[in-house]
Image: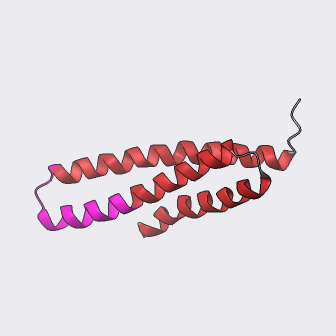
C-alpha cells in the first residue's frame, strides 16, 4: 500500500497529464515549424518560426518540470516543480493570443 494522500495522488496525475500534453504540443510546434519552412513567404516564415520555437521551448520546460515533479520524493521540491510546470504549461497559450 502507498502512503500517499489523495492530494498527492491528484498532483501526480496532474503531472502525468501535463507531461503528456506538453510532449504532444512540442510535436505540434515542430510540425508548424516544418510547414512554415516549406512555405515561401519570407516575412511570415521568420516571425512564425521565432514565435513557434519560443512556444516549443516553454512546453519543453513544462515537460521537464512535470517529469521532475513525478520523480521527486520530497514534498518541498515537488511543490516547486508544481508551480513551474503550471506556469510554463499555461504561458505558451497566452503567447498565442
Farthest residue, direction top:
1
Q: Is the stretch drawn in magenta largely helix, strand or loop? A: helix
> Position of 46 compared to 86: left or right?
left
Foreground residue, 64 or 11?
64
Q: Is residue 16 above or below residue 39?
A: above
- Residue 54: where, in percent of width, then height? 37, 62
Q: Residue at x 54, y 49 (%)?
A: 64
List x then y, in percent, for residue 41. Answer: 12, 61
Q: Is residue 23 left or right of residue 68?
A: left
**Residue 6, placed above or below residue 93:** above
Q: Residue at x 24, y 67 (%)?
A: 47
Question: Relative to the observer, which residue lies in front, 79 or 42?
Answer: 79
Q: Position of residue 59 (x, y in %)?
A: 47, 54
Q: How many marks?
A: 0
The region drawn magenta spans 38-54
State the image quarter where residue 96 is shown. bottom left
Q: Quadrant of the C terminus?
A: bottom left
Residue 28 painted magenta:
no
Q: Per the image, is 43 magenta?
A: yes
Q: Residue at coordinates 43% horizontally, 68% vertically from top-left?
A: 95
Q: Quadrant of the N terminus?
A: top right
Q: Could you tell me residue 69's position as x and y percent?
A: 66, 49
The coloring applied to the image is secondary structure
Residue 86 versus residue 94 in the image, above or below: above
**Side (left or right) of 27 relative to 31:** right
The relative height of residue 70 versus residue 94 in the rendered view (above or below) is above
Amino acid at each position: 500500500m502507498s502512503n500517499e494522500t489523495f492530494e498527492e495522488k491528484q498532483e501526480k496525475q496532474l503531472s502525468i497529464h501535463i507531461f503528456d500534453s506538453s510532449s504532444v504540443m512540442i510535436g505540434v510546434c515542430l510540425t508548424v515549424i516544418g510547414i512554415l519552412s516549406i512555405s515561401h513567404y519570407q516575412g511570415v516564415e521568420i516571425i512564425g518560426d521565432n514565435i513557434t520555437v519560443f512556444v516549443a521551448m516553454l512546453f519543453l520546460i513544462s515537460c521537464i518540470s512535470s517529469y521532475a515533479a513525478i520523480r521527486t520524493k520530497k514534498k518541498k521540491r515537488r511543490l516547486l516543480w508544481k508551480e513551474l510546470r503550471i506556469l510554463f504549461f499555461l504561458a505558451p497559450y497566452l503567447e498565442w493570443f
